[in-house]
């Protein structure tokens, strides 16, 4: 495949090499898009490329890039401009779960989370939506989290950054909707991916009670909402209830639970 000028409609998925990103990528290829798969996991990216090209005979461009670094958004946009790739669908999915008290989280990890969940996706929206505006067509899906409504201790670098992404997406939608551009925010709860692999809990029970959802189902719901031009997508009835109930928990109860869970010295 020549990389000089690519006339096809392309979908760009960040964090494409696993979990939700893998399923977003496959769903968009099934819709007829050629794919730009972005991740910092080169081995898994190559697996995705081989799988999609074999299964669907669709060319896949892989970009091995750390999106938590400062100039990542500009570098990715410049790459697409250089290759004359027209991005019609942008899926900002890349993320990292940061757990721990704010003062104890490593500085580099905190910085990476802030960059990955806020700066990079916001700037990717800013740059790629310029071309969408010219064509009066485009689709942007930003993956936030149900934790966007949970300003709780020990997830202070995760939940609040996802809150920014949720609010940014709503504002962006208001600005771009009159020009025919779909902008949707996906707010999933816990998903059965490697993101939760480092934490010990009964995964089978969580799946049985539908607390832990399959990434394929969540990705399908997100893509469906995007192409139907929905403002938000909250997969699962439990999550829909939780997103209304969690903000109503009085803060003193959160404080009591937090103090009981550890010894404060």
Image: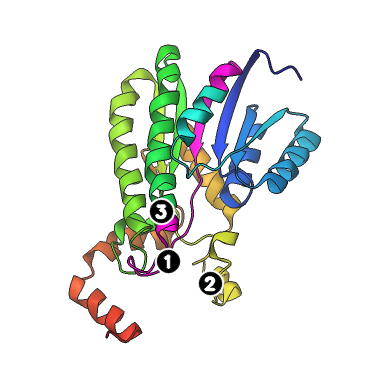
Q: Nearer the viewer, mark 1 or mark 3?
A: 1
Q: Which mark is residue 199?
A: 2
- Secondary element at image label 3: loop
Which residue is tagged 1?
99
Range of the magenta residues?
80-109
Which label sits in the foreground, 1 or 2? 1
Is residue 43 rendered magenta in the image?
no
Q: Earlier in the sequence, mark 1 or mark 3?
A: 1
Q: CA distance from mark 1 to mark 2?
A: 10 Å
Q: Is residue 98 above or below residue 46?
A: below
Q: Position of residue 98 (x, y in %)?
A: 44, 61
The answer to whether marks 1 and 2 mark residues whose Cβ atoms lie closer than 8 Å is yes
The residue that appears at 57% across and 77% down in the rendered structure is 202
Apparent side of residue 30 relative to residue 100 in the rendered image (left or right) = right
- The residue under the point 56% across, 32% down is 12
Q: Is residue 93 magenta?
A: yes
Mark 3 is surrounded, within 10 Å at the Cα level, by few (under 14), some (14 to 19) or many (20 or more) other residues, namely: many
Do the residues bearing badges 1 and 3 touch, measured as CB atoms within 8 Å? no
Note whether residue 1 is visible: yes
Q: Position of residue 77 (x, y in %)?
A: 50, 26
Q: Residue at x 65, y 12 (%)?
A: 5
Q: Residue furthest right?
A: 54
Quadrant housing residue 172 = top left
Q: What is the C-alpha distance between the residues marked 1 and 3?
A: 14 Å
Residue drawn 42% across the image and 52% down it: 113
Residue 116, image x, y percentages: 44, 46
Looking at marks 1 and 2 on the same chain, the residue that comes earlier in the sequence is marked by: 1
Q: Return the residue at label 3.
A: 145
Mark 2 or 3, nearer chain start = 3
Which of the image's four quarters has the C terminus? Answer: bottom left
């Amino acid at each position: 495949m020549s990389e000089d000028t690519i006339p096809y409609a392309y979908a760009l998925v960040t964090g494409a090499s696993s979990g939700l990103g893998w399923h977003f990528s496959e769903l968009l290829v099934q819709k007829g898009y050629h794919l730009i798969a972005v991740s910092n996991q080169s081995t898994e990216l190559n697996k995705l490329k081989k799988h999609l090209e074999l299964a669907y005979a669709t060319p896949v461009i892989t970009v091995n890039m750390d999106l938590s670094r400062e100039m990542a958004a500009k570098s990715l946009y410049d790459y697409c401009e250089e290759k004359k790739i027209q991005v019609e669908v942008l899926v900002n999915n890349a993320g990292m779960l940061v757990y721990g008290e704010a003062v104890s989280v490593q500085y580099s990890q905190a910085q990476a989370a802030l960059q990955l969940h806020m700066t990079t996706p916001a700037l990717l929206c800013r740059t790629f939506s310029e071309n969408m505006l010219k064509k009066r067509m485009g689709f942007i899906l930003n993956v936030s989290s149900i934790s966007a409504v949970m300003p709780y201790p020990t997830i202070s670098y995760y939940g609040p950054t996802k809150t920014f992404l949720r609010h940014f997406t709503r504002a962006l939608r208001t600005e771009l909707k009159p020009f025919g551009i779909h902008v949707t925010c996906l707010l999933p709860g816990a998903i059965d991916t490697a993101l939760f692999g480092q934490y010990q809990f009964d995964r089978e029970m969580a799946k049985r009670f539908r607390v832990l959802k399959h990434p394929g189902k969540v990705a399908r719901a997100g893509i469906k909402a995007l192409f139907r031009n929905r403002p938000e997508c909250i997969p699962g009835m439990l999550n829909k209830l939780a997103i209304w109930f969690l903000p109503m928990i009085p803060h003193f109860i959160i404080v009591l639970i937090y103090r009981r869970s550890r010894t404060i010295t």
